[in-house]
Image (cartoon, rainbow, N blue to C red):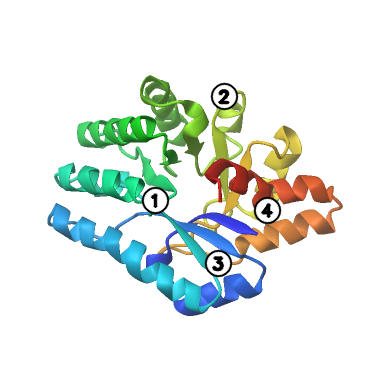
Amino acid sequence: MIDTHMHGDSRSSEDFGEMYLSGIDTAITCAFYPYKLNNESTLLNHLERILNYDTKRAKKYGLDLKVALGIHPANTSVNPDLIYENLYKWIENKQIIAIGEIGLEDLTDSEIAIFKKQLDIGEETKTKVIVHTPRKNKKEVLKVIQDIVPQHIDPKLVVIDHINQNVAEDVIDKDYTLGLTVQPQKMDKEEAIAILDEYGFDKFLLNSDISNKPSDPLSVPKTVRELEKLGYKKTEIEKVAFKNAEKFFKI
């Protein structure tokens, strides 16, 4: 199994071990700094810690931690130029598999400008992009995201993440890959399965988005096992368990 979106820097090594024992072989850890940033050097240090330290921690427990880096909308208060410079370097060196997570939260001018620039980098380098959608005002913000994305990057390079039942119909007919986040206070496995039931398995990825907030590191295997228990076809389950992620991220 592949957990396609998590924040390994905020989780214990024991979580990595539990994930591996539950059947998760690979996970994608994304950038998000949960505290106020004083400067861009602090953010760069955070991103380098993910790349060079958390991957090694996970490996000790059997988990292959792939990395997506970028400027999360909550971290757009700093000068982004240093991060842009390093994104090009990480992409060129094949150290990251995607830019992310990036996106919009409050629709501020700085959020929108930094979001657009990172999409441009993704298009220029043909790098996959993981796009955050917020808990609040999801439908409104998703509309802005959908207005912006096609102007800057091929939608086929983009994951729109944290999709729920309220917005699935707004994106299902587009060229995006869609992320389903099974997480306490966000979406339970029953809602994720209801979305798969209605729209099929071809366009979706599963993730836990485990972070410093209430989380379940085993939400992906729990959802997969529930699908098996309910009698869904193995070939369909495998798409959201790992095959769609392998194909999209080329991992």
For label 3, the SS is loop
For residue 124, say whether it is visible.
yes
Q: Position of residue 15 (x, y in %)?
A: 52, 74
For label 2, the SS is loop
Looking at numbered disc 2 in the image, what kind of residue is underneath it? Lys
Q: Position of residue 79 (x, y in %)?
A: 14, 44
Q: Position of residue 163 (x, y in %)?
A: 54, 40
Could you tell me which residue is drawn at 52 percent across and 56 percent down? Answer: 185
What residue does disc 4 label? 241
What residue does disc 2 label? 174
Quote the CA–CA distance across marks 2 and 3.
30 Å
Residue 170: image quadrant is: top right
Q: Residues within 10 Å of mark 1 (few under 14, many from 20)?
A: few
Could you tell me which residue is drawn at 48 percent across and 35 percent down? Answer: 158
- In this view of the protein, which residue sits in the foreground, 79 or 219? 79
The answer to whether residue 31 is left or right of residue 128 is: left
Looking at numbered disc 1 in the image, what kind of residue is underneath it? Lys
Could you tell me which residue is drawn at 41 percent across and 54 percent down? Answer: 30
For label 4, the SS is helix
Q: Which numbered marker is on residue 217?
A: 3
- Name the front one of labels 1 and 3: 1
The answer to whether residue 75 is left or right of residue 166 is: left
- Name the front one of labels 1 and 4: 1
In primary-sequence order, the first of circles 2 and 4 is 2
Quote the CA–CA distance across marks 2 and 4.
22 Å
